[in-house]
Amino acid sequence: MPASYEKIISELKEKTGAIPLRLDYPAADEAYLEVSLSDFNKTCLWFHKKFNSPVMAFFAVDERKLSGAYAIYCLFLALDGKKWLFTRAAIPQDYPRFNSLAREIYSASRFEREIKEMFGIEPAGNPDTRRLNLHDEVWPAGFYPLRKDFDSRAVQSGERGEYKFDRIDGEGVFEIPVGPVHAGIIGPGHFRFSVAGEPIINLEIRLGFTHRGVEKLFEGKDAHTGIELSERVCGDAAFSHSLSFCRAMEKIAKAELPERAQYLRAIFLELERMYNHVNDIAGIALDVGFTFAAGYAAVIKESLLGVNEKLTGSRYLKGVNVLGGVCRDIEGDKKIFLKNYLVDTGNDFNRLTAMLYSSTSFMDRVDGTGILKRKTAFDFGVTGLAGRACGIGLDLRKNFEEVYNKVNFKAAKEEKGDVLARLNARIKEFEESRRLIKYFLAKLDEVKTGLAAAAGPAREGFGLGYCESWRGPLLYWVKLDAAGRIERCKITDASVHNWQGLAYSVLGNIIPDFPVCNKSFDLSYAANDL
Amino acid sequence: MKTIVVIGQTLLVILLAPLIGGFIRKIKNNLRMRKGAPVLQPYYNLSKLFIKQEVVSDNSSWIFKITPFIVLGAAVTALLLVPFFHTGFSLSNIGDFFALIFILSLGRFFLALAGLDTASSFGGMGSSREMFLSSLVEPTAILAVMAVSLNAGSTNLEMIANVGAIPVSSLLAALALFLVTIVETGRIPIDNQETHLELTMIHEAMVLEYSGRSLAMIELAAYIKQAIFFSLIAGIILPFSIVYPFSYAQVLAGFALFGGEIVAIAVITAVTEVSIAKMRLFRAVDFLAFSFALGIMAVVAQSIRL
């Protein structure tokens, strides 16, 4: 056992009295600490404090066939953000409940509600037990889809309930319900504002309208189908999703990736980041009515999609990832094309940022709007770009990815947490991506061959695949059965945490400023609802 | 003769009013490197809306149904008071500039009521914002015309136009009235006609529940109102094009000059809209305070005969 793990365990025993039952470390960057259910909360709380990490993911697995019990896994980022640390506990199937972590660690709350509705495991003591994705109006009580013995044909009958929104009462306070059908072509979400005049005093976001049962769909699939499915989880992050999924599968198969494939993946990941960031800048400009800049940014986005198509045949980078690497190379003409394009787009982008920063009317709208405080952000586990805009510096590329550190990657960091800070962070990341791709292209010359490692036979196991998608950390925890088919796939996108951050960032702002706050976070409905 | 000209002129302005809107939209899109909809698009939209089925909320009262008629009626009545490219053919003997402002306010008042009537949250929001703005914009509009009316010694629009002089005070007043026009026509930086974001709307939020023929009437009224304000700037405050007495050559020349002025104002409007972002809602106060200050400066300039 590595010394760092030994130290954690002895300290845990000493400080909390919890008794670790088992420690697994199937891969170099992840470890699983099994404790009894009664020690589970103590352990999680201690990890939370010790490593200053929010709950990165928290999920259940139906292991009743195997061991006669459910298992819950709570994930933290430990040891200076260099190791993934799971706390695992078994939950007896005849008494499916555990004590809620939510009162101590708020970032666990949403996951607990999910565990409850998907598995019927009760988080005792969680103050909020309303359903998230299986809406009361359409899904009868008592059916838990992620249990292995779930039968979808039985769902027809049963009692249906009603969702209760938080109510803010008081003189002059009124409610504005918005959505789930919106005037623009965006995802569905219901926003319930409580306002006193124009200022917002409470916002409750209800999501789950695009719940498709993705995690259930993964069950029983083989690797190939799994990749195709992962690309369709969230359209604007198709590459990140398939990348995280592939990495989980590769980790289980213990595949060693050729260096060239690693660089190519990094290039595609940055291309995805670039088109999304510039698209979001267009969105911010459009939402404050600065239409010229919005049009300018939209042109850059379209040209980036064209680049994607030219390099891979897919505007949204689908069908690029395969198990063990990629199936699209960048060489010869394509490489020269990409190199030249980066120069051109750099000039265009500079003009765009100059246009934004020199417009007082634009800066007046974004500066100081929608401030998310660092403390609030930490409590909700806000990660990714939104986190980096309010002083939470986590970037998985910096922490884990070798190819990035070879080229001196610098993560963007802003402190203020307002729309402008998020805009600045995006602009910096766009420029950094452009620089990174240039370096990666140069590195491709050094590593000539090897697009993908040969896929070995499917084997049993579990593992965490992850990448820093343009929204933030995107985690895929995959468990395979003996035949190499997917038994459980848990997806956690940064949106899951960050939607809650959005609800707090708009407090005190006026209603007409909500759209620009929302756009500056640019969160996903699809990757949240699953 | 006068009756025929008045009727003809009124119908002509009603007919051409949507063209200004389509023209501005076209310029805006071209400035943004887009092709844009054809200039005649407003006519296509209106003719589509006039034949479309109307959906009326069960929770609405007669106010909701009667409002489009009042709004359109008010706009057309106000139109009658405005001299365009020659004097003598408006009905300015039945009301002066104050009448014009308050006739338009009547339409606005009913529109705000209709916004509240359906009990939709957006309508209420729109009405509240529209009333907030109108309380600021009406005094400013009156002050701007006041400055030029001092010159004529009358608030009657025709008499103001007849003076025909363009002192410094008129330029200040024109600028003040241009800012008022931006607010009245729901344009950036105060409102945004193009937005799809229901939470940021002002005028559009108020009329969100309207459909079919009623919506067509409200939209047409908005185009007419825009034509009125553009004409006020072109014809009253900067009366290059006002011709008198009546002759065919004069009328044609006046029409061409007037049209040119309207096009110039439309281009300025379009460029303004594209080049700046919308203001935060409560900043509208600063915007209109500036306009009000311009109005006061115009009055002062007028009183010292500048």
Image (spheres, grey):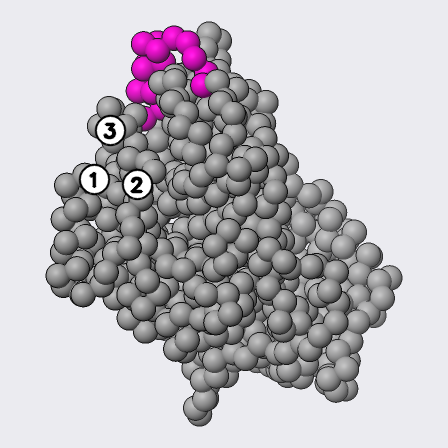
Q: CA distance from mark 2 to mark 3?
A: 24 Å
Q: Residues within 10 Å of mark 2 (few under 14, many from 20)?
A: some
Three-letter code for the amino acid on which mark 3 is drawn: Asn
Is residue B210 visible to us here? Answer: yes
Three-letter code for the amino acid on which mark 2 is drawn: Tyr
Residue B64 locus on image (x, y percent): 73, 81
Q: Chain of mark 3?
A: A
Tell me which residue sits at (63%, 58%) in the image. A149
Q: Residue at the bottom extreme?
A: A171
Q: Earlier in the sequence, mark 2 or mark 3?
A: 2
Residue tagged 1: A1
Residue A367 locus on image (x, y percent): 31, 57
Q: Residues within 10 Å of mark 3 (few under 14, many from 20)?
A: few
User: How many dots with numbers?
Assistant: 3
Residue A219 locus on image (x, y percent): 59, 46
Circle on res. A25: 2
Circles 1 and 2: CB atoms closer than 8 Å: yes
Say whether mark 2 and mark 1 are on the same chain: yes
Residue tagged 3: A405
Q: CA distance from mark 1 to mark 2?
A: 9 Å
User: Looking at the picture, does residue A308 appear above or below residue B55?
Assistant: above
